[in-house]
Image (spheres, grey):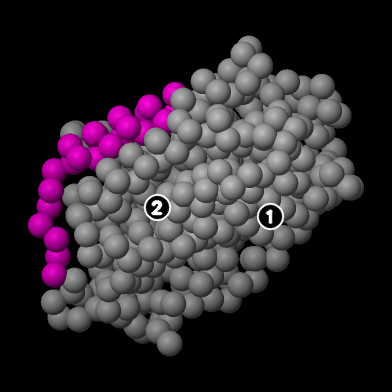
């Protein structure tokens, strides 16, 4: 087996952990509210900080990987995740929640986010880039599948501090795999990228000097001159608002508002992650064969319609109509990532990982706005109905933005 697949496996495990750790606060909203009396909106601020930094740090992490390598960045990010989660068991004030789950975990998870995926795929793969992007993107859904039911059960039966410790230990458990398997570039072990040949050579490693932050900001300044970049950023901001920010953060408390047990609601969210594994890998496969712009338009349209139908589906029990939503929405959860990565590669070439990092930052800004906004809607209106309807309408707008992206002739591979 080509070494690239082992590196992809280590990346998959790292992204499973980062996504699972980052999604934990959504399950702990009600336990934290019960113990400390903090409102949904106040706790939502911590989630928003986490989401913003998860996105905004992503292009800087890509620049750090470009400057120092993939492995050193991961070797710092995983201990950060462990520290941020572990210290929450000692917190007594809300600012400590904002600092630990917001800042520390946000930076740690942001170092192992979609820009990391784009960097790994660009360096180690020439063929099967869409498929590998889909598999690595599915790691986020797998993280939900693994952690959310366990976190909900532990929080219900043993208090919220137990899952916080579990996350801390799990983050450190991933570190040895990263140190053993991951290398920065195929040339470091005397190989070419998977699928490389004379017509499609391995991207040569570039010696970088200078400030990594300046490199990230330069990539943003150059990309921002392009109308295409803003179409990507606008669509992905809506993507983040309608997934991580709204459903990922507020689905469990919204279902609980209608009498559904916490563990049942968390299990439904985990099933979304399970179904998304199929949807995202399938999206990666289709991205290698179909115009990515058309895929994005279809995904956003279907997501918007499903979110508009959701308020009528909540209840104390899980009915077939709710299962239909879970499966339908789950197939679309982050299926948008492989075609967006492909479009960035088409339009921005070797700068694609850092440019996609900034596009992903817009995703997380949108998610942060939705996380806080939906919490405020719940606090003022007594329900999440307007949040679901607004997100659905925005998704239809993202359909239009996707179709406005200029077409680039596809490579024969």
Q: Closer to the camera, 151 or 176?
A: 151
Between 354 and 373, the one lying in front of the other is 373
**Count of number-bearing discs:** 2
Taken as a whole, is the magenta stretch helix, strand or loop?
helix
In the rendered image, the residue lying farthest to the top is: 380
Is 268 rendered above or below residue 9? above
Question: Which circle marks residue 335 in the picture?
Answer: 2
Please tell me whether mark 2 sits on a helix, a strand or a loop: loop
Dot 1 or dot 2: first in sequence order is: 1
Residue 292 visible within the image: yes
**Residue 36 part of the magenta segment:** no
State if disc 2 and disc 1 touch (CB < 8 Å): no
Image-based side of 145 in relation to 292, left or right: right
- Quadrant containing the C terminus in the rendered view: bottom left
Q: Is residue 77 left or right of residue 28?
A: left
Q: Quadrant of residue 375?
A: top right
Disc 1 element: helix
Quick one: which residue is furthest to the left in this view?
409
Tell me which corner region of the image, top left, top right, bottom left or bottom right, holds residue 131: bottom left
- Residue at the location (52% across, 44% down)? 325
Residue designated by label 1: 147
Residue closer to the observer: 305 or 42? 305
Q: Position of residue 364 (x, y in %)?
A: 47, 37
**Where's residue 388, x and y in %?**
50, 28
> For residue 175, what is the image quadrant?
bottom right
Magenta span has 400? Answer: yes
Write down the region rendered in magenta: 390-412
**Residue appearing at x 65%, y 66% in the figure:** 174
């Amino acid at each position: 087996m080509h070494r690239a697949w082992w590196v992809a496996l280590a990346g998959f495990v790292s992204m499973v952990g980062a996504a699972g750790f980052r999604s934990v606060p959504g399950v702990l909203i009600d336990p934290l509210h019960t113990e400390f009396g903090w409102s949904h909106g106040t706790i939502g601020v911590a989630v928003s900080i986490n989401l913003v930094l998860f996105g905004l740090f992503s292009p800087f992490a890509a620049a750090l990987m470009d400057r120092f390598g993939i492995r050193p960045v991961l070797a710092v990010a995983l201990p950060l995740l462990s520290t941020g989660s572990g210290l929450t068991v000692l917190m007594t004030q809300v600012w400590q929640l904002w600092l630990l789950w917001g800042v520390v975990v946000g930076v740690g998870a942001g170092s192992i986010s979609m820009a990391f995926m784009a960097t790994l795929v660009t360096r180690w793969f020439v063929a099967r880039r869409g498929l590998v992007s889909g598999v690595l993107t599915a790691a986020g859904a797998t993280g939900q599948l693994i952690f959310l039911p366990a976190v909900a059960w532990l929080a219900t039966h043993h208090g919220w501090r137990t899952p916080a410790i579990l996350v801390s230990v799990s983050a450190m458990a991933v570190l040895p795999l990263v140190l053993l398997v991951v290398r920065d570039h195929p040339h470091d072990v005397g190989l070419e990228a998977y699928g490389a040949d004379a017509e499609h050579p391995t991207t040569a490693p570039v010696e970088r000097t200078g400030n990594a932050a300046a490199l990230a900001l330069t990539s943003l300044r150059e990309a921002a001159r392009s109308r295409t970049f803003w179409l990507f950023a606008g669509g992905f901001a809506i993507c983040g608002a309608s997934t991580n920010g709204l459903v990922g953060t507020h689905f469990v408390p919204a279902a609980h508002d209608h009498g559904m047990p916490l563990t049942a609601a968390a299990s439904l969210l985990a099933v979304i992650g399970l179904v998304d594994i199929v949807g995202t890998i399938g999206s990666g496969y289709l991205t290698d064969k179909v115009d990515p712009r058309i895929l994005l338009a279809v995904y956003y349209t279907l997501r918007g319609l499903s979110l508009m139908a959701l308020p009528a589906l909540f209840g104390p029990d899980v009915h077939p109509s709710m299962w239909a939503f879970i499966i339908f929405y789950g197939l679309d959860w982050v299926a948008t990532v492989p075609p967006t990565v492909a479009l960035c590669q088409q339009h921005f070439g070797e700068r694609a990982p850092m440019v996609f990092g900034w596009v992903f930052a817009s995703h997380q800004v949108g998610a942060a706005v939705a996380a806080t906004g939906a919490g405020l809607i719940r606090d003022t209106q007594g329900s999440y109905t307007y949040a679901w309807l607004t997100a659905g309408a925005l998704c239809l707008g993202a359909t239009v933005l996707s179709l406005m992206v200029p077409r680039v002739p596809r490579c024969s591979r």
